[in-house]
Amino acid sequence: MKTIYEAGEWSKDFTEVTMIALKKKTKATKCSDHRTISLIAHTAKIIAKILKRRIERKIEDVLGEDQFGFRRGKGTRDAIGMMRIIAERTLEIDEELCVCFIDWQKAFDRVNWTKLMQILKETGIDWHERRLISKLYMDQKVRVRLDRGETGSVQIGRGVRQGCCLSPILFNLYSECLTKEALDGLGDFKVGGQIIQTVKYADDLVLMAKEETVLQGMIDRLIEIGRCYGMEMNVEKTKVMKISRQPTPVTIKIDQKQLENVKCFKYLGSLLTDDGRCTCEIKSRIAMAKAAFSKKKNLFTSKLDLNLRKKLVKCYI
């Protein structure tokens, strides 16, 4: 590690990655029908882990309290909880809140390396760590393992490395700088005197504003700055919702295309509704439990020992 750290050079074995494509469905014919898994050298993983520990604290200091992804002590429950609290608070004071659920197209694969290195420098990351991260990215190559053998090495030009422990914190930093630059001075929704603009979980971004025109301005600005960062919004998957006692449609456009208004949205596995209630979520959870139990019907009606059946239920349900 000391030699690599001082020289700033990675061994070829550390920068070359073998990828395996797993089928998402039985009749997979397109690239999008597959999920890739990266096989990275164990030594490279250890060095990346050391690098992560050296830069993590400085990056954590930059991240906002509204980022819940890939952070110690935070998770999906916190992000869902914050969204529910915001919805309940809005309805309590009889106000309305316009919400946009942003979907970035292949966000992790579109990170611009030059921009990333610039951000690392501005964050105060030491030159030695920056040099190692830069070389790791600039020199990386990928081979794809297929049934008939492996392809030749291909140079990668953008995106964070799949399967690398550095990728989550680097992406968090990248997206944090993007949203801060785009939304600086915007927003009109306040809680406790503080303006709340976003709730973030990695690449899952929720924008919010009291006024429809304010939300449109925030989205326009986010699109503009996002393109400078190499990011593009997926118009088909980006949705809008108005949280209110009497919800009405919201007219929000991206490149002259109107976004779909939804009454219910599945956010990080939990159903959020425009009336701020949990009824749909509770019904959904009950239905999922019923489905899980019905799949194990044979287990419940079998002649196995009762204690053994209890253990199997705990294991599988």
Image (tube, helix red, strand yellow):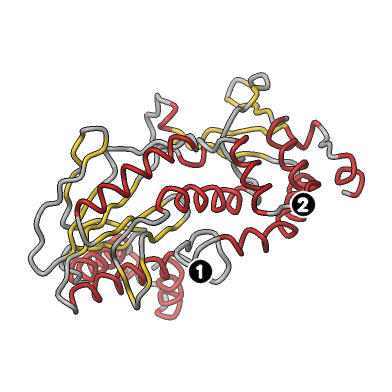
| Quarter of the figure with residue 247 | bottom left
Side of 248 where 168 appears, left or right: right
Per the image, the residue denoted by label 1 is 74
Closest to the observer, 17 or 80: 80
Residue lying at the far front of the rendered structure: 185
Could you tell me which secondary element the residue under label 1 belongs to? Answer: loop
Closest to the observer, 46 or 257: 257
Residue kind at label 1, given as amino acid type = Lys
Mark 2 packing: few (<14 Cα in 10 Å), some, or many (20+)?
A: few
Residue shown at 18% from the left, 71% from the top: 279
Residue shown at 31% from the left, 46% from the top: 219
| Quarter of the figure with residue 300 | bottom left
Side of 151 where 3 appears, left or right: right
Q: Position of residue 31 (x, y in %)?
A: 44, 27
Between the residue at mark 1 and the residue at mark 2, the CA separation in whole angstroms equals 27 Å
Circle nearer the N terminus (1, 2): 1
Per the image, the residue denoted by label 2 is 126
Mark 1 packing: few (<14 Cα in 10 Å), some, or many (20+)?
A: some
